[in-house]
Amino acid sequence: MSTSVVLPALGESVTEGTVTRWLKQVGDTVQEDEGLLEISTDKVDTEIPSPVSGVIEEILVQEDETVEVGAVLAKIGDGSGAGSSDDAPQAAPAEQESAPVEEAAPAESAPAEQAAPAASAPAEQSAPAADGDSTEVKLPELGESVTEGTVTRWLKAVGDDVAVDEPLLEISTDKVDTEIPSPVAGTLQEILVQEDETVNVGAALARIGSGAAPAAAQPEAPAPSEAPAQPAAAKPAEQPAPAADEKPAEQPAPVAEEKAAAAAPAAAEKPAEQASASSNDDITYVTPLVRRLAQQQGVDLASVTGSGVGGRIRKEDVLKAAEAAKSAPAASSAPAAAAPAPAPVEVSPLRGTTQKMSRLRKVIAERAVASMQATAQLTTVVEVDVTKLSALRDRVKGEFQQKTGDKLSFLPFFAIAAVEALKAFPIINSTVEGDEIVYPAHENVSIAVDTERGLLTPVVKDAGEKNIAQLAREIADLAARTRDNKLKPDELAGGTFTLTNTGSRGALFDTPIVFLPQSAILGLGAVVKKPGVVTVDGKEAIQVRSYVYLALSYDHRIIDGADAARFLGAVKARLEASQFEGDLGI
């Protein structure tokens, strides 16, 4: 008897996942809890372990396919069913996927037209297109606290052919910007929500129907949007062969159709396809995560060939291109050393242009203005001598990284000092509700993170119960996932106080804005060395010291200047004493 391996729940707001790589193949023996495959979601990348020990008899979801939580990924048994799968391991997925299509609509007259969808995506998803019915593309849930989204850009136009999981449009919310993929293969028949329109979760965005049926009715004069179906019908014998060699379920429809077009006589229509793909390549298949990674690695996306669904450029493609770029100039170290010089004076492509504000930028702007209009904000600044703290950090950072795997910056020290002061002066951690002041029983610290989409503030929950190692790990994790657009929307909610490290960009201090419903925000300036007056043997002397400015902005409706001064005084005393050895957590 076989056991089904299902896609488990990977988070409250995660409804589906994409198989990125199978670690085992049909016929392999696996142990319980041994990694079977890698799954990628919009929140997390993880391995799915085997629920039992046995032999993989069947793989039901191929690489690059997206399935919902609870879907069956594979079957594991005692090995008795693996033999038949081994006999034709590559043809099986196509046969299994084409069967539901035939059950939904017996279209034996057009087997070649169904071959491409069956090879690139689950047949049950392609079924609505096969029987001529249209499928609505709806705005999915993007987090527990996200109720609506704004269409920022359509990546496809009416009449365009789309493959399963190929990006259709970009959606922006006040928490996250993301692409909405097509749930089925077919032709985009109707766009129901225009760019810059805001709709609720569950609203219909577009309709996708069959693009193959018109091609079958007019095989001798296919329309441009039906071009992929014609080569498939013209070469029924050639289509299945490359699909089987190249993992049918992994091969996205546009790529499979483009290869078929190269072998078919209708090659005259291929340049049009390629022109369309190239003109939209950097728009359609490049996610914010990949754009940022490419920027960090110095990779030109125009030179990268995507290996994902629909030709999408994935992280792995960028990393491979970066490795290739590093190995190429290895023989010449001198030019490489001189190369970074022109980078600071590179002219931005935005110069001289006009751009629409993103949904996130609009939300930030609205909240900033609302905060300034609804509160009476004031900023108090103190200077802190962190010479002892700098020496402590230099002394323990090697051991800290060895034991925890995290780099030790100044931020966790500032965070723990601020949290301790919040416990002593809870008015700084409070919120205003009507004519009442609410004092939370916990310290949830928001950490301002600079991203290419705008400023986001993920929250370290219960920061008052954590040591420096725990704070360093959580802050680094939240910051990385925020920049990679893998943050759960719920991780941006619930903050009671904010830290913003403007010193990371060299600023001495600023006057940060308090965002409602919080009442205070602490700006951390750059740690700099400069001459300072100290007392040595009872006499004043000048030494080189390390200093930092701490700027506390607060709501003057409930927080007085004296409250702010007492809070900053407590933080200053804690940092200057620098007795953190017992709080390191190593």
Image (spheres, grey):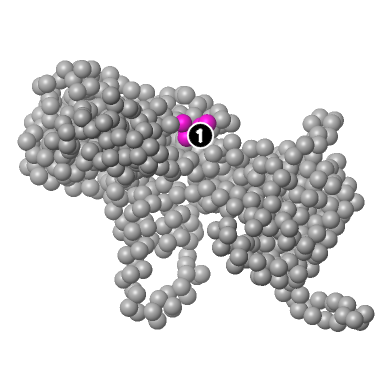
Q: Secondary structure at mark 1?
A: loop
Position of residue 401 in the picture relative to residue 192 (left or right): right
Vertical order, 126 against 250 (above or below): above
| Residue 17 visible in the current orientation | yes
Please state which amino acid type lies under the numbered disc 1: Gly
Q: Residue 83, percent across and down? A: 17, 33
Question: Residue 17 falls in which quadrant of the image?
Answer: top left
Q: Which residue is mark 1?
A: 11
Give the magenta part as a residue range. Answer: 9-14
- Of 49 and 526, which appears nearest the observer? 49
| Residue 63 visible in the current orientation | no
Q: Residue at x 73, y 43 (%)?
A: 443
Question: Residue 494 falls in which quadrant of the image?
Answer: top right
- Of 55 and 313, which appears nearest the observer? 55
- Of 266 and 334, which appears nearest the observer? 334
Magenta part mainly helix, strand or loop? Answer: loop
Q: Residue 94, percent across and down? A: 19, 32
Position of residue 295 in the picture relative to residue 239 (left or right): right
Quadrant showing the N terminus? top left
Position of residue 489 in the picture relative to residue 270 (left or right): right
Q: Residue 532, percent across and down? A: 81, 76
Q: Residue 380, percent across and down? A: 82, 56
Q: Residue at x 57, y 44 (%)?
A: 361
Q: Residue at x 77, y 64 (%)?
A: 578
Q: Is residue 351 magenta?
A: no
Q: Residue at x 17, y 36 (%)?
A: 86
Position of residue 270 in the picture relative to residue 450 (left or right): left
